[in-house]
Image: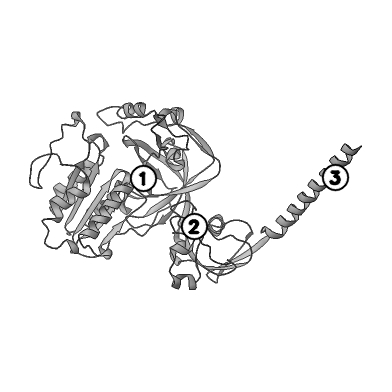
Amino acid sequence: MTIVISVAVFLIVVLMLVALLLFAKAKLSPSGMVKITVNGERVIETDAGGTLLSTLGNNKIFLPSACGGGGTCAMCECQVHAGGGEILPTEKPYFSRKHIAENYRLGCQVKVKQDMEVEIPAEIFGIKKWDCEVISNYNVATFIKAFTVKLPEGENLDFQAGGYIQVDVPELTVDFKNDINIEPDPSDPLGPDKFKSEWDRFGLWSLKMVNTEPCFRAYSMANHPAEGNIVMLTIRIATPPWDREKNDWMDVNPGICSSFVFSRKVGDIVTISGPYGEFFIKETEAEMIYIGGGAGMAPMRSHLFHLFHTLKTGRKVTYWYGGRSRKELFYEEDFRQIEREFPNFKFHIVLSEPEESDNWKEKKSLDDEGDGFLGFVHNAVIEHQLKAHDAPEDIEFYFCGPPMMNQAVIKMTDDWGIPPENVAFDDFGG
């Protein structure tokens, strides 16, 4: 009898605690319909509970967010004049005291709990979302895809060279062995297995990406405005970290969006939104140096094609591109053609680890005969251009590449006294 009473008391206590938790959740968690007034004009009626970023996106107001709503890029900023509560510690590092006083917030960090009044930049209303068809998707380097989609008929992406878009990723699983094709362009003389040996060597085929909820990621466009209603991206596959003890990949999910893009086939439909961006060409007559590496080629191509194919610029422009070996180079002939047509443009390649089969003929100076330079790209810029320049502080620098390259170039421009207004870099393309 005592046991029965004890069990009954225990069950009653558990039920009371559950009821208390449900009551607290109903009181504390946002629920029901709320109104969001945007720029004093448009009123959105929506369910409470989501972030301001996702809620606005669901209502076709697409704030930029390079990190996919993770609170690290600080690009989804807007002003919340009422209903947003106190600014969070995760937001404060991104704003000055003046901006905090003016109610600036990160849309991804603000929860929609009650009626709100928000203000967003006018240009955000020009951002749209489309379901686009994949028209090509082939490897241009061992770990880099050239991914191209076309917008629906009659639609146009009104953007500036250097802009970016966001790719929506649905819930899905990508099995690298069965879902990914790494063949190069069919016209490549090295054939369909050009990159297979490297993928075999690193055991990439064993990887699997699992995405359990819809998300999005930002990528810089490689196309320039005159190329019409297409979007071209150069995307590097994001692998898990390498476990040196196991001599294998760590048990970590590969890059969600890069795996998704690598698995897309011609004819597939992919949802994108845009245009976004601020990495644009400055309208001056200053000399320009471009520095790129890896998938950072994308905004470099967009800028340079616009400068020479559309603007026919007379500005002095030098493009330095760093790669590991000859196999990792792409679009080289496109830039050589610009070099032949425009005497004010120079294109230099720097390899860090050329293979024996590359037969790489190293140049020792700009006037030397050869294929290109050896080492790290920022060192080549210093040795062969900045040291001989009368006024490097007058040059405009544009760069995009892997994080270590970006950091090295930032240090280089600082060491050489380049004013901040002459330094622009895109942190998405590496």
Q: Is residue 192 visible?
A: no
Asked whether, in this view, residue 110 is left or right of residue 335, the answer is right
Q: In the image as oriented, which residue stretches furthest toward the front?
A: 2
- Residue 332's quadrant in the figure? top left
- Residue 115's quadrant in the figure? bottom right
Toward the viewer: 13 or 356?
13
Give the image location of residue 381, x and y in percent: 18, 51
Q: Is residue 228 visible?
A: yes
Q: Residue at x 23, y 58 (%)?
A: 413
Report the residue marked by disc 1: 233
Select label 3 or label 2 by which is in front. Answer: 3
Q: Residue flagged by tag 1: what amino acid is it? A: Leu
Asked whether, in this view, residue 427 is left or right of residue 176, the answer is left
Q: Quadrant of the N terminus?
A: top right
Q: Residue flagged by tag 3: what amino acid is it? A: Val
Give the image location of residue 429, x and y in percent: 35, 48
- Residue 327's quadrant in the figure? top left
Describe the element under mark 3 as helix, strand or loop: helix
Q: Residue flagged by tag 2: what amino acid is it? A: Phe
Q: How is the image coloured?
A: one colour
Report the residue marked by disc 2: 62
Which of disc 1 and disc 2 is earlier in sequence?
2
Q: Are marks 3 and 1 in contact (CB under 8 Å)?
A: no
Q: Residue at x 22, y 39 (%)?
A: 352
Q: In the image as oriented, which residue stretches furthest toward the right?
A: 1
Report the residue marked by disc 3: 9
Give the image location of residue 308, x and y in percent: 22, 54
Q: Residue at x 17, y 46 (%)?
A: 348
Give the image location of residue 414, x and y in percent: 24, 60
